[in-house]
Image: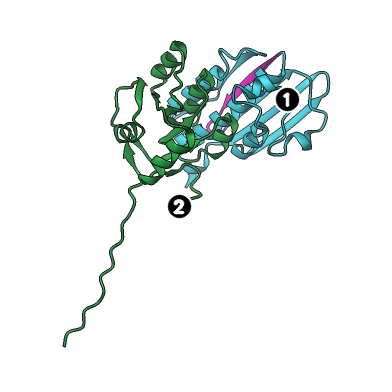
Chain colours: A green, B cyan
């Protein structure tokens, strides 16, 4: 009699997703767009401390989730090659900050979720930390 | 990298000018990118100089950021007219900060500035005189990838 081996299925997480999908997951409003909204996001970082971001943001093509809405956040994103910023709790940056992001090619989105929930939703969909600590 | 000759210049930094803070590092990052330097090296240089620039904006009255780009390395020197650092070893510790609360509210003063500069530099030198100011030198090699 033929012996059957047990089949094992592995579900692999897709750790890269388009910005459009991120926007969908966060139910976010786009406040600053750039030419390519199909930009791929490969990791997420989250902090309200800029130097922590500069320390830990080790992979380009990151999304930043933050509660800070000043120009410094956009400048930090530019320096660290962060492609998009999600502002939490529905907080919206001023026009000057939005214009700076447009000039630097950084997408700004606003989500009503808290930092914890926003990050949790993205993690559940397969996006991992920019620090690489969870891979 | 296609650059053959040395390129140098400097930016004047004004303490407390948070509106333009990071502008010098941003310009330097564009310059290095346009020179064809590898993105990862440009990124390290940008982070190190940005942290240095922010330290001047946060702590000093004024300062100068000087850069020298040669085919071998990027050298950035930051000179400031600030309060100086009484204990450099303590200042180099991750998490140690003397930034006031209003600066922390803007997202700075995490105590990671100097450690981040050191982390991204191949050579890092800091010298300070209390009551006069601080000098930081950052050197990042650009040649290594080319020679492989």
Q: Is residue B67 magenta?
A: yes
Residue B10 appears anywhere in the view: yes
Q: Which residue is mark 2?
A: A135
Answer with the quarter of the image where residue A44 lies.
top left
Q: For the residue labelled by badge 1, is the local secondary structure a helix, a strand or a loop?
A: strand
Asked if residue A78 is positioned above or below residue B122 in the image, the reply reads above
- Quadrant occupied by the N terminus of chain B: top left
Q: Which residue is mark 1?
A: B135
Question: Residue visible at 31% across and 61% down?
Answer: A10
Magenta stretch: dominant SS?
strand
Question: Residue visible at 55% across and 34% down?
Answer: A54
Answer with the quarter of the image where residue A21 lies.
top left
Q: Position of residue B111 (x, y in %)?
A: 68, 33
Query: Is residue B2 shown left or right of residue B125?
Result: left
Query: Is residue A1 shown left or right of residue B12?
Result: left
Residue B38 appears anywhere in the view: no
The residue nearer to you, when weighing B55 against B79, is B55
Look at the image and give the residue range highlighted in magenta: B62-73
Question: Residue visible at 39% across and 40% down?
Answer: A122
Q: Position of residue A84 (x, y in %)?
A: 40, 29
């Amino acid at each position: 009699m033929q012996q059957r081996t047990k089949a094992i299925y592995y579900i692999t997480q897709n750790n890269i997703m388009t910005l459009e999908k991120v926007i969908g997951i966060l139910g976010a409003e786009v406040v600053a767009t750039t030419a390519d909204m199909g930009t791929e996001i490969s990791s997420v970082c989250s902090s309200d401390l800029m130097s922590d971001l500069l320390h830990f943001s080790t992979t380009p093509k990151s999304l930043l989730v933050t509660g800070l809405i000043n120009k410094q956040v956009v400048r930090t994103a530019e320096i660290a090659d962060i492609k998009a910023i999600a502002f939490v709790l529905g907080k919206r940056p001023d026009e000057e900050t939005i214009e700076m992001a447009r000039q630097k090619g950084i997408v700004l989105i606003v989500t009503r979720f808290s930092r914890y929930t926003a990050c949790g939703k993205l993690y559940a969909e397969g996006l991992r930390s920019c620090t690489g600590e969870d891979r | 990298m296609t650059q053959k000759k040395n390129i140098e210049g400097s930016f004047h930094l004004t303490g407390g000018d948070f509106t333009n803070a990071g502008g010098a590092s941003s310009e330097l990052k564009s310059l290095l990118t346009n020179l064809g330097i590898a993105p990862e090296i440009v990124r390290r240089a940008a982070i190190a100089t940005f942290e240095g620039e922010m330290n001047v904006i946060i702590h000093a009255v004024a300062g100068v950021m000087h850069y020298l780009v040669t085919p071998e390395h990027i050298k950035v020197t930051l000179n400031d007219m600030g309060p100086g650092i009484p204990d450099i070893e303590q200042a180099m510790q991750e998490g140690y900060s003397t930034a006031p609360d209003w600066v922390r509210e803007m997202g700075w003063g995490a105590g990671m500035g100097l450690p981040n500069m050191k982390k991204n530099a191949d050579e890092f030198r800091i010298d300070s005189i209390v009551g006069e100011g601080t000098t930081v030198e950052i050197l990042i090699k650009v040649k290594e990838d080319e020679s492989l």
